[in-house]
Image (cartoon, rainbow, N blue to C red):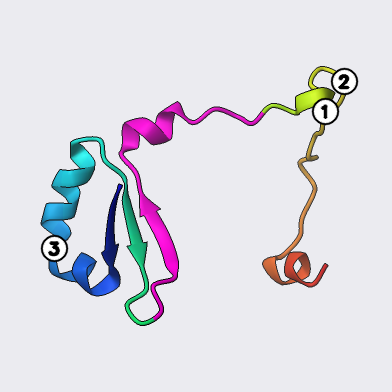
Amino acid sequence: MTTLTQKQVKDNISKIFEIVKKGENVLIKEDHNQENIAIIIPYKKFLLKKDRPLGILNGKASFKIKDDFKITDEELLSL
């Protein structure tokens, strides 16, 4: 995985697209504190991502979100 700072991403976006097209992930870090911000992954890897199994509850538990369920981002964050 290639690791770059925000400034490096801004300065080299075309090169980054070439890296990602070759199948490599790119980790982006903040300039000043090196905190991880994001990972750019190839689209093909994104499509391969499968749903997470329920583990020991697989086949025993399920969930459904009803069509009339509504909550704002603010309401969710205040829970």
The stretch in magenta equals 33-52
- 3D distance between C-alphas at marks 3 and 1: 45 Å
Of the image marks 3 and 2, the number of the one nearer the N terminus: 3
Residue at (79, 72) in percent of width and height:
78
Query: Where residue 49 appears, x then y in whole percent?
Result: 49, 31
What secondary structure is found at the residue carrying circle 1?
A: loop
Residue at (82, 17) in percent of width and height:
59
Instruction: State left or right for residue 60 relative to residue 21.
Output: right
> According to the image, label 2 marks what residue?
60
- Please, is residue 4 above or below residue 6 in the view? above
Label 3 crowd (10 A; few <14 / some 14-19 / many >=20): few
Q: Amino acid at mark 3?
A: Asn
> According to the image, label 1 marks what residue?
62
- Please, is residue 77 above or below residue 17 in the view? below
Query: Where residue 58 appears, x then y in whole percent?
Result: 79, 21
**The disc label shown at residue 12, or none:** 3
